[in-house]
Image: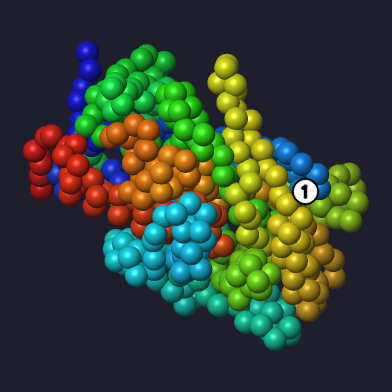
Amino acid sequence: MSERFDVVVVGSGAGGGVVAGELAERGRNVLLLETGPHLTAADFERWESKASHDMWFPIRLALPAGDPGPGPLALISGRCVGGTTTINTKLALRASQREFDKWNAASGVQLSVEEMAPFYDRVCSYLGVRRRADWNWRQCVRTAAAGFEALGYELEPVDAYTDENCMQCGSCLQGCPTNAGKSTLNTYIHRNWVAGRLQLRPECWAERILTADGHATGVQYRDESGAPHTVEADVVVAACGALGTPQLLMRSEIDNPWVGRNLGFHPAQFVFGLFDEPQDAHMVAPISSHFLENAPDDRGGYIIEAVTVQDPIGFTVALCDENGPMWGEPLVEAAKKYRNWVGLLCLSNDDNNGRIEVDADGNETYWCDFQPHEIERQQAAMEFGRRVMEAAGASQILWSTFASTHVQGSCRMGADAGSGVVDIHGESHDVKRLYVGDSSVFPRTLSVNPSLTVMAMATRLADHLDANESGYLSGSRQLVA
């Protein structure tokens, strides 16, 4: 037996959660599938290893395809209802026209700040985005700010989708225990799921998108017990993230040469400074402020986010000094001084040279291939962070290996099938009624945190689907109070 929906959305993060919530709120019959568990604030606690097990995908590694270059690169993303928005730092940054110009040059799509502004505005209003005016009340923030000021620069408070109940407890990466952090879980999804407008099925693994005569017709998935199910749909939206969506398309035999290519990472590296007095950087909003002046490629191609220190396991497993990854007595001594470290997160622009491969047995491999000019940006970002820590008075400076939480671009938009996987609305060039609604569609990696842009693009996609200009949606609206 098969069920039928107007829209089936696979993945509940910044893209899928918004598309599903927006369409359900307008009376469309929507099913939202999520491979991870449905956990809420009642389940969230600052137990690092448990949260990593319950809510994160196991760490995946992007292997270096060439030489030179950093690698392997740790890939970090959420595996729960709400996706990575449930465990991220809630920064709300808009893409500049410079970013959209990169998109346009890469694949021929034409988007602009003016066109996207209404969608950004709607997301910001829905989530209650605000300026974090309380950004500098902790010692660790003042310490970092003093380092920037000594060099003639200034840290600025961030805009974030957090409300006034945020007490900067620092547990964002384990899920917000007070619901002050506005993930898609506790906004777009719950508001419609609780009201009976949205069907949500967690712990369901989408095996493939079903197609017939060049059209998507539904999804085949397995539930928590492993039992197979088939659902039919007028439209399917793949929103499994830039790592998962191309794999779903490959399993579904969507034949486009750009699937899995053009993968960008926005690689991140911590720089840590040690200070004599306790800084307690683990007890503050993980990202309270930032320095964006060097974001353009011609000004360095990197941004700095402050202040942060990972929880103890994450802090120690990736810690490095001039001899490479730390171990033994030096690592023990660094860990003992955990409360005295202040961290800066250095994120550099990259040019989408990564890729994803899946073999006949379904085993995935991720590749990064940073070119010399990209490595120069990474080194410049780290050197800038080092200078700030030195200016702030750090007695020792350490750093982390590279990681990525901002993967983008693996099913990029393009003017046609020769330049991308989907069109400017996110619809597949190869299969009608199939859309991609996550960061996979970005033709180039953004220089700022991408979640707000993913949500704005998802809102734009929801508008397009609801307008039904293609005549795909056959059911009538079923509005529920």
Left or right: 114, with 233 as reference point: right
Looking at the picture, how far across and down is residue 18, in whole percent?
A: 32, 49
In this rendering, the answer to whether 54 lies above or below 323 is: above
Observer-nearest residue: 166 or 362?
362
Residue 86 image position (x, y, % from top left):
45, 48
Left or right: where 217 falls relative to 107 = left
Q: Is residue 337 in view?
A: no
User: Residue 196: x percent and y percent?
Assistant: 18, 39
Residue sitting at x 82%, y 55%: 334
Q: Residue at x 85, y 55 (%)?
A: 321
* Quarter where residue 309 is shown: bottom right
State left or right for residue 370 relative to residue 155: right
Quick check: can you spot residue 9? yes
Q: In the image, what residue occupies the spot 39% across and 68% down?
A: 113
Crowding at dot 1, Cα within 10 Å, few <14 / some 14-19 / many 20+, comes out as some
Circle 1 residue: 69
Q: Nearer the viewer, residue 130 or 106?
A: 106
- Local SS, label 1: loop
**What's the residue type where badge 1 is placed?**
Gly
